Image: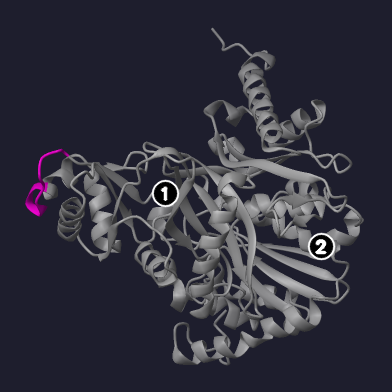
Amino acid sequence: MELPSYLPTPGSTEEREAFLALQPRLQTMFEQHYPDPRHPRAVVVLPGLSLDRETLTKLVGAQHYEERQLSMLTWLRLPRAKVIFLTSAPIPESLVDYYLGMLTGVPYGHARRRLVLLSCNDNSDEALTRKILRRPRLVQRIREAITDPAVTHLTAFNTTADEITLAVQLGVPLYGCDPELNHLGTKSGSRRMFAAANVAHPDGVEGLRSADEAARAVADLRLRDPALRRVVLKLEEGFSGEGNAVLDLPRAPLSADAVRPLLETALRPEAEGQSPAQFLQAYERMGGIVEAWVEGEGKSSPSVQMRVTPSRELEIISTHDQVLGGASGQVFLGSTFPARQEHRGMLVDAARKVGDVLRERGVLGRFAVDFVTTKQPDGSHAAYALEINLRKGGTTLPFQMLQFLTAGKVDADTGSFRTPLGDERCYYATDNLMKPAYQSLTPDDLLDILVDHRLHFDSTRQEGVVFHLMGALATYGKLGLVSIAATIEKAEAQYRRVVALLDAESAIAPKWRGFEAPR
């Protein structure tokens, strides 16, 4: 099936003009339709990660990350809302049942009728949008599922030229950052935005295109700060901290010529199994930055999630303290919400300055700013902005799940989350709970364990645990979860209890099979 003749060629000027003509509909929907919860509306959810194939192959169970956006089913709380959810492979009906079963106040059948699930039946490492565009008949089925384009928009994890093409072919606007502005969220772009916003960030050099340029940048940083002992190289479009590499510096004076061989022998990439040579090859291809490593006591890695609405208003959505791992603690593993009170206000103030600069430059939709904070000798805290993520991210799903399950909202004055009854709720979340033994468990086993031990989210108490990434369990032994409770300490204790139960249940799996190999 060929592309209909009335659709513009992907990447053409005509396509760009068609895209820009669609975008004003967002403001109309946001201001005229959405304030009335009974007004018809629809969202096409594109949960795939539009990243290059090399990056996707490094992310364990990348395809199953599409399940994280099932939190968008919260739209079905609205009585006339429709959700069209697109995936690489079909989502098991048991997972759909799991999420819809947590909708309060809406009959299951009513919600299920308003949910359309469409898939490519393609498990390859290719990005989801590219899979869809290669299947014109699937695009046509999506088009047919859109009842009224005037009240429908497309939302994606991140936006590229492919998402523009799909939006135009569907005839609906895209609620997300225009890909022509994506350079603002690269590592170099982030540093430039921090400078424009007059927000503190580590000393560094951006816009580098080769290992030789990186070596000169390291030497320059050392010249500016003779006490500098560590630097970090970052790929322009690294994902989840795995595009970073650390270099420890000797105490002796350094020239660019002395740094260059160190990059080949002493560089420590954060991505597991990646050699210095492989990292430098990616650096040559993608470009990047060099930054001074932030030293200090009591370091933490918080983030602030924001969005620019179609009405061009900047909203602070949430604050988080990130849980990081990896060789040098730069790989995102999870988060706690909200960020600690001691630095929450300072982070919001800095993030708002960055958000205002991005809004002025035309950014639309969700994004986040990552920081590192250190404790000063006088007991105060210093915050340094590290990067901007112009997309949804690891903190998006847990916060949406909190809203999905409790119907609460953030208190603008304190940054804490309150249920409709005024009770505070926090969470501990991860999408990287992974152990080989967990491959012995199925999603149904997970639910049995939760229910047996009364850990499943209870809408009466508004506490408990919700799983996601369950599709990755059997193949990778990997899953994610959000543990919701009245305090972060209680949420983390609840999380650790779940891990202990999963460890115990997966450890006994070989025993209950009662099978002996033939002699």
Judge whether residue 251 is colored magenta: yes
Res. 196 image quadrant? bottom left
Q: Position of residue 202 (x, y in %)?
A: 34, 55
- In this rendered view, identify the residue nearer to me: 237 or 418: 418
- State the SS at label 2: helix
Residue farthest toward the front in the current orientation of the protein: 378
Judge whether residue 158 is colored magenta: no
74 sits left or right of 105 in the view: left
Q: Main secondary structure of the magenta part?
A: loop
Q: Can you identify the residue that label 2 sits on? A: 76
**Rendered view: 511 above or below 59:** above
| Range of magenta residues | 250-258
Residue at 77% across / 54% down in the picture? 404
19 sits left or right of 514 in the view: left
Q: Position of residue 427 (x, y in %)?
A: 68, 42
Q: Dividing the image into 4 quarters, which one contains the C terminus? A: top right
Q: Nearer the viewer, mark 2 or mark 1?
A: 1
Q: Can you identify the residue that label 1 sits on? A: 241
Res. 133 image quadrant? bottom right
Q: Is residue 112 visible?
A: yes
Q: CA distance from mark 2 to mark 1?
A: 34 Å
Residue type marked 2: Leu
Tell me the crowding category of disc 2: few under 14, some 14 to 19, or many 20 or more residues within 10 angstroms, Cα based: many
